[in-house]
Amino acid sequence: MGEKHQRYLIDFNDIPSERQRMPELEVETRKTNFEEVELGFSMEKAQEEARRCLSCRRCLGCGLCLAICQPKAIVFEQEDELIELTVDRIVIAPEVAGFSPLVNESVNVVSAFQFERMLSPHGPYGGVIMRPFDGEVPQKIAFIVDGAINDNGHYLLSYTMQEVLLAFRRVNDVAITIFVFNKEKAKEALGSEIKEGIAIKEGQIKEVKEKEETKNPLVIFIEDGEKREEEFDLAVSAQLPKISTYLKDLGRKLGLSMDNKTLMDTPHPPLIETSLSDIFFAGLIL
């Protein structure tokens, strides 16, 4: 078995930005005193400089990751290789297609599961809610709940409302808009937690676009029979997990059909036998 993709560096146009220049005393002033030459950054300049190192999305070869990696698991000289393994059993774990068809490649639109990782204190952002594009804390967030509510719809709605309330408590003065097909069910899921600053809109989402200059998500929707649009700093797409095309293709190669299978909503999915001995599914309802 080998890697699905070879290792590569993703090209992000937003980083790295130019390094901030340290303010210094003028030469003429230095001649007459022994004061510190470097004046230090202002609050604004310090924040701009800190954003350059917000996350290592591009390897600059600084070696800091190697210095702090206690298991010494980072090998800069490592090259791609194809590894053949002989195993007794194969467990196929579900790879999830996280985004709904409404979401394009907008950098500031995330899935509900990505947002959950953002909320986690052990996640990539340390529990701080921020825009992936520039690290800014969003002041206006949209939650788009999948309109195709099935038997597990109550789970999706409840799960999303928990994220809404966590976001409302984490970000000061945040404005949250929830787009759902049934406003009453959303109100029931929120219960007594409905607060000023959380709006619920019932209508059909037509499209989510990205504004080129700000990278803000622009939600286009139908409300009361009229087409409307609203701009947000961050959008969260909430949908039930779906099996990815890659996993379906893998199943076909092994002679297993996964077209009519769905994912289980549990952190501890059981192993399920398949038509082939020693090959199992993890977390799939047959």
Image (cartoon, helix red, strand yellow):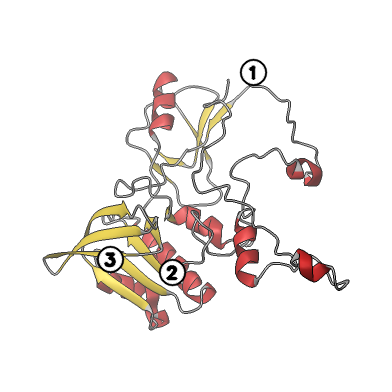
Q: Residue at x 35, y 58 (%)?
A: 217
Quadrant placement of the C terminus: top left
> Does residue 228 appear left or right of residue 27 in this picture?
left
Residue lying at the far right in this picture: please name it.
34
Badge 2 element: helix
Q: Mark 3 = which residue?
A: 230
> Does residue 73 appear left or right of residue 4 in this picture?
right
Q: Residue at x 32, y 75 (%)?
A: 199
Q: Earlier in the sequence, mark 3 or mark 2?
A: 2
Badge 3 element: strand
Count neighbours of disc 1 (C-alpha within 10 A) and say few if under 14, some if 14 to 19, many if 20 or more: few
Amino acid residing under circle 3: Glu
Q: Residue at x 38, y 43 (%)?
A: 242
Residue 164 disc label = 2
The answer to the question of whether label 1 and label 3 lie on touching residues, with beta carbons closer than 8 A, is no
Image location (x, y in percent) of residue 280: 52, 31
Q: CA distance from mark 1 to mark 3?
A: 50 Å
Residue 83 disc label = 1
How many callouts does the rendering have? 3
Count neighbours of disc 3 (C-alpha within 10 A) and say few if under 14, some if 14 to 19, many if 20 or more: few
Q: Nearer the viewer, mark 1 or mark 3?
A: 3
Amino acid residing under circle 2: Val
